[in-house]
Amino acid sequence: MQRELFIKMVLDAWDTQIKRTDDLFNQLSDEQLMAEVSPGRNRGIYLLGHLAAVHDRIFPILNLGKEINPGMYEVFVASPDKSGAEIQPISELKLYWKKVNSKLAEQFSKLSVEEWFQKHTSVSEEDFKKEPHRNKLNIIINRTNHLAFHLGQLIFLKPRNQ
Amino acid sequence: MQRELFIKMVLDAWDTQIKRTDDLFNQLSDEQLMAEVSPGRNRGIYLLGHLAAVHDRIFPILNLGKEINPGMYEVFVASPDKSGAEIQPISELKLYWKKVNSKLAEQFSKLSVEEWFQKHTSVSEEDFKKEPHRNKLNIIINRTNHLAFHLGQLIFLKPRNQ
């Protein structure tokens, strides 16, 4: 019972950050998303693609199947913003972001308590014996903090007095 | 054993964000901390005080005693930046930040597994029966995300090519 509770706590925090980011993306115009979050920093469109690509990578890490769009990782994670790589239109990136998160939510709801405490695919069997905290649920804790980190930057795309 | 593991997962994530933020504060000069993280936004000095004051408030919320400096909450949480309130020098705020976090670490290490799953002081007994996830450990999950959110902003105080 404590274990179910713990999973709820972690997934609630994830859902809260997803909801806040989603609300922000829905509020921002394409013009606002094309701007840099701060002078000389990443653009909103890049962070939108970055977050979606990082979340898409969760599928293989948690052994939940393949990424929806594996090519996005190269453009939005392995490459910095303004690298010259071709970027999809904002409307498509917004759909990708929504699709990844809704498919993750669907898959998360099917994972059993035992599965959440199993090792993820980036850790070896041997290391996992010594470090059992490197389980699937821990990936969600870390990705939630990653999301909050970039959300703190993305809110700068909103006008100051809004 | 599984319950100890949850606590380790949450506290490891907390420690990671604290360490990153601490390293950043150590790298930044007073001049850099006096700057706004982005044009028209909070200054570094304000976010330093804000994070320290929010963390100081964790003591009463987890029933671990009083805040180290209760007056800070009014200046750095209840009031916005540049409100005209007198702000302590950066050197003192840095000491306050370190003192709060090291005292929290000390207290966290003494909490038993049972205590982490007890209700925090901001939730009523009645609500806690219906919402048992509103426990002490959940406060740490949420405050870790809060810290990551502002860390994402504070890194803009570093020069771009560093």
Image (cartoon, coloured by chain):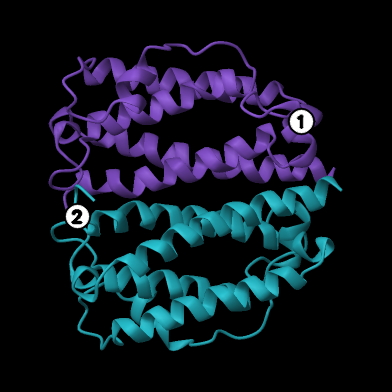
Chain colours: A cyan, B purple
| Place of residue B84 in the rendered image (x, y in percent of width and height, measured from the top left) | 16, 20
> On the picture, is A68 further left or further right than B138?
left
> On the picture, is A70 further left or further right than B22?
right
Residue at x 37% of width, y 86% of height: A92
Res B35 seen here? yes
Image: A154 above or below B60: below
Residue B23, picture quadrant: top left
Q: Chain of mark 1?
A: B
Identify residue for label 1. B126
Q: Nearer the viewer, residue B28 or B88?
A: B88
Residue A107, picture quadrant: bottom right
Res B117 seen here? no
Name of the residue lying farthest toward the front: B126
Q: Nearer the viewer, residue A8 or A59?
A: A8
Disc 1 marks a residue whose amino acid type is: Glu
Q: Are marks 2 and 1 on the same chain?
A: no
Q: Which mark is residue A159?
A: 2
Q: Nearer the viewer, residue A14 or A66?
A: A14
| Place of residue A96 in the rendered image (x, y in percent of width and height, measured from the top left) | 45, 82
| Place of residue A80 in the rendered image (x, y in percent of width and height, measured from the top left) | 28, 72
Q: Secondary structure at mark 1?
A: helix
Residues packed near mark 1 inside 10 Å, few (<14), some (14 to 19) or many (20 plus): few
Q: Nearer the viewer, mark 2 or mark 1?
A: 1
> On the picture, is B93 further left or further right than B145?
left
Image: B153 above or below B74: below
Q: Chain of mark 2?
A: A
Residue at x 20% of width, y 76% of height: A82
Residues packed near mark 2 inside 10 Å, few (<14), some (14 to 19) or many (20 plus): few
Q: Nearer the viewer, residue B96 or A121?
A: B96
Image: B90 above or below B28: above
Residue A119, picture quadrant: bottom right
